[in-house]
Every structure is written in structure tokens, then in C-alpha cells.
Amino acid sequence: MLATYTRDAGLFEPGSETHFEILHMAADGGVGYWVGFQHASAKMSGNAEPIPMKLRVTEVFRREAGEWKLVHRHADMLAAPAKDRDSLDGTWLPVTAELSGRTFPDEVRKAIQLVIEGGRYTVTTGNQVDQGTVKTNPSATPKEIDITGTSGPNQGRTIPAIYDWDGDRLRVCYDLSGESRPTEFKTAEGTLLFLVTYERKKSQ
């Protein structure tokens, strides 16, 4: 059975990976089964980044002509814990902000709203709208995020940043110069480092 899965793993597109966590397996004569988890990082058409998946799996095999033939498979996708999903989608309001070592003016901070949805962002500051794409690297330390403007004041610019996220609180340190990625969550005079702590806007 394991040989069968080694072969099937090769059917994923380049960049995909899969492995199996077998909790129990047995065979008796011409029938065999296994129960456990399938962990996969699937490269899917139309997605630049691999998609992580975890499935709870039961499969039953029958031995025919010297080979194991899959006769039944049941799989349920398991939802990742909130800490692991790294979902930044939502509406975020800044609660603290500092730029170049100085506290950001409250009247400007309170006028800012960030919306992230499906890898895209919209920042509204009063009547000004900035839109673009968001790309994250949650496996980095600290976690990395790149903001690329497609319309508005940052059109054509990529702003490197770092972030940490804990449910309804998001902290981001941007280098507004676009020159290099921050390495820690602080700003300094003479730089264009911008540190913001957001809270997720509650549904009404």
C-alpha cells in the first residue's frame, strides 16, 4: 500500500508535496485498510503559492493479480487552527502608529481603514484610496509581508514589511522607502519605518 502512495504522490504538479501519517493499518488475506491523516502542500493551477491541506483519511484495498487495488476512500478536510491559518482577511483599524520614531497624529490614524481580502488590500485615508496586492511569508522569522500598489498613491511600488498576528490583533512594520525589509518592530528618526498595530473591526 505504501508503494502505491509513493507512486501517486508523483501525480501532483511540480512544487507539490504529500506525506501520510498512518494511525492504524492492517491486512487479512486479500483485503487491507489504513486510517490516518494525509498532509499535503498542493501546487494548484492558477495559484502561485502551494496550498496546505490536512485530510482525515480511510482507505480500503483489495488484492488483485498480486497488486493492491483501491476500492474505497473517504477523506474529510480538517480545518486548521486559527493560529495556523494565518488569515489576515478582514477590516482592520489602527489603534497605535508611529513613523520615523514619532507617534503618528491621532486625527490621521483614526481616518485610516485597512481591508484585506483574497490577497488584495484597500487602504482608505479620508477620501484617498490605495489599492494593491498582499503577499505573505508566514514561515519567515519575523513573518514577512509585501504590499504592492496597483492604484492610488503607491501604484507600481512594493513596500516590504514584517508582521505578527494574533487573531484580532495585527502588527505591521513597513519600510515606506521600499529599500529594505525591517528586521524588528520599531522605528527610528531619519528612517521611513512605519509601525502600526491594528485591531480587527467587529461585525455589527
Image: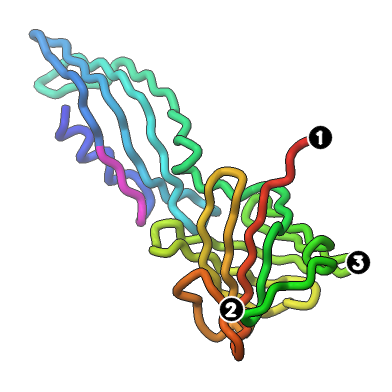
- In x, y percent, where is residue 154? 73, 77
185 inside magenta stretch? no
Label count reads: 3
Residue in view at x 12 percent, y 13 percent: 27
Please state which amino acid type lies under the numbered disc 2: Asp
- Residue 121 lies, with reference to residue 45, above or below; the image says below
From the image, which quarter does the C terminus lie in?
Answer: top right
The residue that disc 2 covers is: 175
Please state which amino acid type lies under the numbered disc 1: Gln
Relative to 191, is 64 on the left or the right?
left
- In x, y percent, where is residue 122? 75, 60
Q: Which of the labelled discs sits on residue 127, or is there none?
A: 3
Looking at the rendered structure, the secondary structure element under dot 2 is strand
- Residue 141 lies, with reference to residue 182, above or below; the image says above
Please state which amino acid type lies under the numbered disc 3: Asn
Disc 2/disc 3 C-alpha distance (Å): 23 Å
Most common secondary structure along the magenta stretch: strand
Q: Quadrant of residue 76?
A: top left
Residue in view at x 66 percent, y 56 percent: 198
The residue that disc 1 covers is: 204
Disc 1/disc 3 C-alpha distance (Å): 23 Å
Name which of mark 1 and mark 3 comes first in the sequence.
3
Looking at the rendered structure, the secondary structure element under dot 3 is loop
Residue in view at x 70 percent, y 57 percent: 95
From the image, which quarter does the N terminus lie in?
Answer: top left
